[in-house]
Amino acid sequence: MAGGTKTKKRKRRSLKRKRISNYGNEKRDCRVAVFQDYTSGFVSPRTPVSDGSTTNGDGGDNTPTDPASVFFELANSPLVGYRVDDKMLVVRQDSDCEIHTGGIVWETSYLLAEYLSAKFGGTKTQYLLGKTLEIGAGCGMLGLILATSGLSSKVVLTEASEVMKNLKHNVEANLIQEEGRGDGSDDDSTTQTTGVHGTEYLPLCPSDGICVKQLRWDHLDEDIDTTGDLEPHSFDTIVGTDVVFSPALVRPLLETIQRMAKKYSKDDDENNRQSLIYLCLQIRCPDSHALLFSEAHSYGLEVIDVTRELSTVGNNYGAAKPCAWGLELECVLLKINAIPTKRKKSKDRNRKTSKSDKKSKTKKHRAV
């Protein structure tokens, strides 16, 4: 890894020893570090927020401008925000957590959200990503963005058991409450006034567009649901960020992707496209990265490095390069394709059957 990323990691570790945990203190400190405000120094200017709201990361003199420092600041903020149109998603972080890596929103989550928005957003057609599975959802920021931006029709966020508490809390806090008092009164409508995590921002995620499920890659048979949200081979899109970090988990990860992606054949019609699969990561373990590429074919998959798209995506919409900062942080973008299977056509099978029937009838006739 480059010096910038290593420096950022050292800063995080030293800061943890000095800072008192902010987990659960959102009522005491409701300031939100907003991604778009912090990254305005190296990402193209955004559309102004209609309500004119500002945060503590509003591009003041103390806001850093280089990507490594920016994401260091974001990672160590108790609450982080991401604007969707003129509204705000707010996620609580637990940057002091030491038992897993899902306590903060990693830069790759923001990067993949920006990439997918630039590549598939900006059109009148909604839900281009269809039913979406996020593996290793962490704090839930990426899945929440996809569910609220109109990119996905439904998002299923999955994690291991030790990360589920904060993930569920973040999703539930951002859900739009059902309208109506439910008491049968004439005025059966209510105005939602409770802000997300004690902030001024109201929830904006539709409750029917997102859910949280446990999905352990090494216990798939126990966690998948053949008739529910985790039905195998039912996802149009699969995404994951920083999920390649241990050689022991590479094969379970590939099996998870293979089991949840749609089955794909060369003979399928155009309407039955294969699943879109994207992983965004930093190479934290070279052995795991190499194993991902070498073992993919064993699971009917091929891994393609499309990192170069980070420097070009977004140009079609007349904007500057919104993802180029990922290259400076040595982020890697991978696209995984299912290797199409060869499905025999029924006509060919019928022809072979008819030929064998004729041969058997001829033999019987000669015997007589």
Image (cartoon, rainbow, N blue to C red):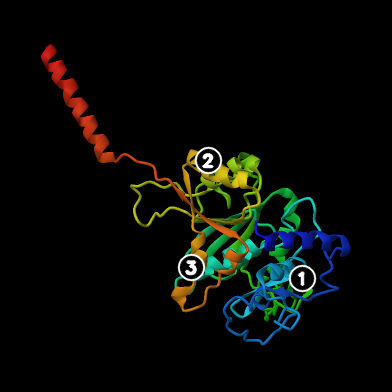
Kind of residue sitting beneath label 2: Glu
* Residue 333, percent from left and from top: 54, 58
Q: In which quarter of the image is residue 16?
A: bottom right
Q: Quadrant of residue 183?
A: bottom right
User: Residue 181, relative to residue 161: is it above or below?
Assistant: below
User: Residue 241, relative to residue 250: is it above or below?
Assistant: below
Q: Which residue is drawn at 84% across and 66% down?
A: 22
Kind of residue sitting beneath label 3: Lys
Q: Can residue 316 be seen in this view?
A: yes
Residue tagged 2: 295
Which circle marks residue 197 in the picture? 1
* Residue 301, percent from left and from top: 47, 45
* Residue 97, percent from left and from top: 80, 56
Kind of residue sitting beneath label 1: His
Which circle marks residue 119 in the picture? 3
* Residue 29, percent from left and from top: 83, 74
Q: Using a 10 Å C-alpha cutoff, classify the residue at mark 1 as few (fewer than 14 neighbours), some (14 to 19) or many (20 or more).
A: many
> Dot 2: what SS?
helix
Which quadrant does the C terminus fall into? top left
Q: Is residue 123 visible?
A: no
**In screen coordinates, is 200 left or right of 325?**
right
User: Residue 128, relative to residue 302: is it above or below?
Assistant: below
Q: Which of marks 3 and 1 is in front?
A: 3
Task: Out of 190 and 261, give the one closest to the viewer.
Answer: 261
Q: Using a 10 Å C-alpha cutoff, classify the residue at mark 2 as few (fewer than 14 neighbours), some (14 to 19) or many (20 or more).
A: some
Q: Which of marks 2 and 1 is in front?
A: 2
Q: Which of marks 2 and 3 is in front?
A: 2
- The residue furthest front is 3
Q: Tell me how far mark 2 sits from mark 3, CA to CA.
A: 28 Å
